[in-house]
């Protein structure tokens, strides 16, 4: 039995999602008739994305002082969280696992950028975000004026958002269920950290939990 299992091909994320009836197209079909308002404005979501860029940079080794100065000068410091302020105060006081977790927040940032139409599609969570594009083309440069970026943020329609939120929530729930059966039950190309941090961002959008307190329940 063990030999049969070891040779059994693992599903791709696309095959796996399709087996549960989860959409695998780049952007799932809009939920028609859904028009409930967001928990945050486009500006607030754009602000969180900029702050996350600074958080990820410092967690990945960038010296914090210029980032802190920039966020302060741009009146964004009050939008940082307690955990983020601890990181900015002294990255070395944050344990390695937590810093790594904060580095992966770039995937939450990417999801939020999709929400405000700065990223075209999310697609299935099988690859990391385009960090070169993130740094060079999307987020304002360190030290620059963030107002044009904030002012240009536009929310996707609630029906489009809900379709993507539902897809990622369903993928997350299926992952939690399947991992109980062992690693071979998980798709070969599914990037768990990408899925988790996208789900984290979407949970925050509900406006129920503060950023540091988000729980990705299934």
Image: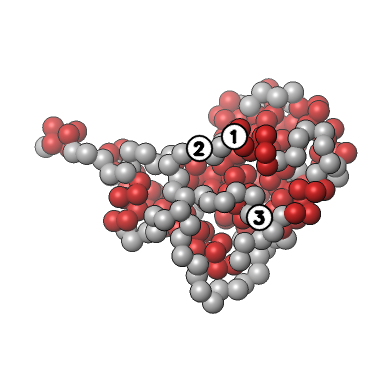
Residue name at image x 26 percent, y 40 percent: 10
- Nearest to the observer: residue 122 or residue 137: 137
Give the x, y percent position of residue 157. 61, 66
**Whole-number angstrom distance, CA of label 3 to CA of label 1:** 18 Å
- Nearest to the observer: residue 158 or residue 84: 158
The residue carrying mark 3 is: 116
* Residue 131: numbered disc: 1
Question: Looking at the image, do the residues carrying marks 3 and 1 touch, with CB atoms under 8 Å apart?
Answer: no
Q: Is residue 95 left or right of residue 16?
A: right
Residue name at image x 19 percent, y 33 percent: 6
Is residue 44 visible in the rendered structure shown here?
Answer: no
Q: Quadrant of residue 179?
A: top left
- Nearest to the observer: residue 110 or residue 181: 110
Residue name at image x 72 percent, y 60 percent: 41
**Whole-number angstrom distance, CA of label 2 to CA of label 1:** 8 Å
Split into 4 quadrants, where in the image is the C terminus?
bottom left
- Is residue 133 placed above or below 147 in the rendered structure? above
The residue carrying mark 2 is: 128
Q: SS for tag 3?
A: loop
**Whole-number angstrom distance, CA of label 3 to CA of label 2:** 19 Å
Q: SS for tag 1?
A: helix
Q: Which colour scheme is used?
A: secondary structure
Q: In this view, does 167 lie to the left or right of 14?
A: right
Give the x, y percent position of residue 154. 69, 59
Is residue 189 visible in the rendered structure shown here?
Answer: yes
Split into 4 quadrants, where in the image is the N terminus?
top left
Give the x, y percent position of residue 176. 39, 49
Residue name at image x 75 percent, y 39 percent: 140
- Is residue 159 placed above or below 211 in the rendered structure? below
Question: Looking at the image, do the residues carrying marks 3 and 2 touch, with CB atoms under 8 Å apart?
Answer: no
Give the x, y percent position of residue 2. 15, 34
N-terminal-most mark, 3 or 2: 3
């Amino acid at each position: 039995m063990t030999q049969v299992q070891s040779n059994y091909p693992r599903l791709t994320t696309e095959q796996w999602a399709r087996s549960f009836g989860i959409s695998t197209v780049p952007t799932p079909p809009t939920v028609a008739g859904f028009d409930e308002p967001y928990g945050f404005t486009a500006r607030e979501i754009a602000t969180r994305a900029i702050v996350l860029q600074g958080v990820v940079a410092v967690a990945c080794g960038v010296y914090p002082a210029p980032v802190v100065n920039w966020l302060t000068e741009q009146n964004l410091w009050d939008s940082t969280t307690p955990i983020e302020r601890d990181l900015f105060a002294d990255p070395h006081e944050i344990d390695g696992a937590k810093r790594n977790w904060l580095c992966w927040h770039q995937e939450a940032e990417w999801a939020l950028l999709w929400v405000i139409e700065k990223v075209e599609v999310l697609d299935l969570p099988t690859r990391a975000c385009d960090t070169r594009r993130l740094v060079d083309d999307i987020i304002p440069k360190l030290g620059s004026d963030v107002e044009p970026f904030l002012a240009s943020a536009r929310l996707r329609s609630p029906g489009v958002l809900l379709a993507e939120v539902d897809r990622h929530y369903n993928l997350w729930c299926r992952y939690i269920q399947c991992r109980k059966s062992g690693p071979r039950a998980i798709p070969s190309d599914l990037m768990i950290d990408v899925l988790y941090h996208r789900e984290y961002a979407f949970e925050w959008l509900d406006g129920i939990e503060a950023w540091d307190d988000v729980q990705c329940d299934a």
